[in-house]
Amino acid sequence: MNAAVKTSSLSGAVSPMIPVLACALAIFLLSGMDAVMKTLVIAVGVYNTVLWRSMVATVIAGAAWSGGTRSKPTIPVLRLHVLRAAVVGITIICFFWGLGRLPLAEAIGLSFVAPLFALFLAALLLGERIRRQAIWASIAGIAGVAIIVAGQFGQASYSQDALLGTAAVLVSTVFYGYNLILARQQALLAKPIEIMLFQNLFVAIILGLAAPWLAVALPSNLWLPLVGVTVLSLAGQFLMSWAYARAEAQYLIPMEYSAFIWAIALGWFFFDEEAAWTTLTGGCLIVVGCLIAARANPKLAEPIEATV
């Protein structure tokens, strides 16, 4: 199905530029969410930040789901919702834990390797053929990660905490690669608003099991940033879904990597972070690898911000 047919079937006559601009706005909103999330993680820790955000998101998504046409998910669909929520929970805990210990641009740059893992997981779990592009993409991605990590050793402020943060972000990319596989299956069985509701609901339930030992009351001055983070996340996800329903992935994927530019700008503005040349070089190599991977399988090339 070409872009013109897809556009007319879903939304009438829509200019191809509109989905691109919607995707660009989504990336900006999600990048802003990352910056605020880093502030919250530093303030109350990653567990409480993600727990409370999931609860607020459940309320907002639940209200939207209840107000529209809805149907109760079947047991097999619920199982898929639970499985993906568990994977997403691990992804966001690891990602935001690492984000609290790394410069914003460095964490975002490292997170871009997720689509490369997704290509190989698709081959392992779905039997898809590993194309030559995927191999070249992986070489570029690995080289980019190596340059970023090597740059950490060369900094005067080098610390073991930064290496642990790097490891946490890379672990999150592995789980996010699996998440992309599940997302493809889930999209065939449920509408976006249902997916957002049950994903946040089950993440909140899973994390809530440890609440008696780990949960703390959120300070009153952090509720507004938390609600803001939740709205930015849901709005970004909605715009991303809207854009991908109306334009081919090959037009939108390059726009998504503008998150790296936003991360540099927001990290400098809010946290006084300066992107090292190793971060810039490594991040660019990873982006090049992901753009090569997008030609092999565009459906598995979405960056991590699209879901977390």
Image: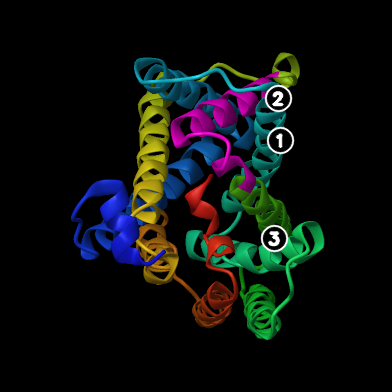
Mark earlier in primary sequence (1, 2): 1
Local packing at callout 2 (Cα closer than 10 Å; few below 14, some 14-19, many 20+) is some
Under circle 2, the secondary element is helix
The answer to whether 128 appears left or right of 240 in the picture is right
Magenta-highlighted residues: 185-208
Local packing at callout 3 (Cα closer than 10 Å; few below 14, some 14-19, many 20+) is many
CA gap, disc 1 and disc 3: 17 Å
Mark in the foreground, 1 or 3: 1
Q: Does the magenta stretch include residue 200?
A: yes
The answer to whether 240 appears left or right of 52 in the picture is left
The answer to whether one can see residue 299 in this image is yes
Under circle 1, the secondary element is helix
Mark earlier in primary sequence (1, 3): 1
Under circle 3, the secondary element is helix
Q: Which amino acid does label 1 sit on?
A: Ala
Q: Name the residue under label 3.
A: 170
Q: Name the residue under label 2.
A: 206
Q: Name the residue under label 1.
A: 86
Percent across and percent down for residue 185 are: 63, 45
Nearest the viewer among 292 and 299 is 299
Nearest the viewer among 59 and 79 is 79
Cβ–Cβ below 8 Å for labels 1 and 2?
Answer: yes
Residue 128, image quadrant: bottom right
Q: Which amino acid does label 2 sit on?
A: Ile
Give the residue at x 67% y 38%: 84
Give the residue at x 31% y 51%: 9
CA gap, disc 3 and disc 2: 22 Å
Local packing at callout 1 (Cα closer than 10 Å; few below 14, some 14-19, many 20+) is some
